[in-house]
Amino acid sequence: MHLYKLHKGGILIEFTFSIPVCITLLLFVSDHYRFYELKNKIRTSAYLLGSIIQQIANTRTNKQLTKADLNRATFASCLNFFHTKSMFYPWPFGIYYVARFHYVKRESDNNYKYNYWECSIGSNAQSVDAGMWNSKLTSANKSSNEIEAIHPDLICYKNGEERLLITCFYGATKNTNFTKSKLGLFLLEPKFNLDGNFVYKFVITPKPGLFPPAWK
């Protein structure tokens, strides 16, 4: 009987020590699933943005995209996560959505026309028409080495060929008051920037006439 009691006490001690380990393991698994879910959402947003850009001007005579077209396409592509206006101020998730674009057109073997711009959310934005923030449309001529340094898939194989690099990611600043609990995270601390955990980029060949965009 005495030995039984000692054995029973040992089991209770082991069980007591195993509880925090099991809880930590469950929280760790939950965080990893949440990371996977957010990565999947940013990937889906990027592909959706590319699809919208390719189709948005189908019914127009003038196919060239405008800044308003790109703003609305960017906003629509993030609705798989940011429902309604939840990507706008006061940022209930503590993060926001950014889309960056690198457009190139090959003029000759070592000469490319290059454009860069960015679409995101202004600090006090509450609507897609009034609140989208845009960088300036940067225009330049670049060599093939410079284009390859941006992304190898931007290299074109014949004159007149066009490529568009789309980069989508989630960002966070002090203004958005991000805490990991807002995303349902317990242990892992995510990074939100161009080199963070939730970034997706890919290259498409845009339909003729869409780019460069009319930036007015």
Image (cartoon, helix red, strand yellow):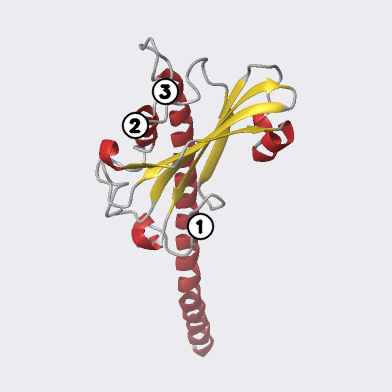
- SS at mark 1 in the image: loop
Q: Quadrant of residue 111?
A: top right
In the picture of the structure, the residue carrying the numbered disc 2 is: 72
Residue 68 relative to residue 27: left or right: left
Task: Identify the residue at horizontal 38%, vertical 38% (top origin).
Answer: 78
Q: Earlier in the sequence, mark 2 or mark 1?
A: 2
* Mark 2–mark 1 distance (CA, rounded to whole Å): 26 Å
**Which amino acid lies under the numbered mark 2 shown in the image of this protein?**
Arg
Task: Identify the residue at horizontal 47%, vertical 27% (top origin).
Answer: 50
Q: Quadrant of residue 97?
A: top left
In the picture of the structure, the residue carrying the numbered disc 3 is: 65
Camera-side mark, 2 or 1: 2
Between 162 and 110, the residue placed more toward the observer is 110
Q: Position of residue 56 (x, y in %)?
A: 39, 20
Task: Identify the residue at horizontal 60%, vertical 34% (top origin).
Answer: 140
Between 2 and 187, the residue placed more toward the observer is 187
Whether residues under marks 1 and 3 lie with C-beta atoms below 8 angstroms apart, the answer is: no
Q: Earlier in the sequence, mark 1 or mark 3?
A: 3
Camera-side mark, 2 or 3: 3
**Which amino acid lies under the numbered mark 3 shown in the image of this protein?**
Leu
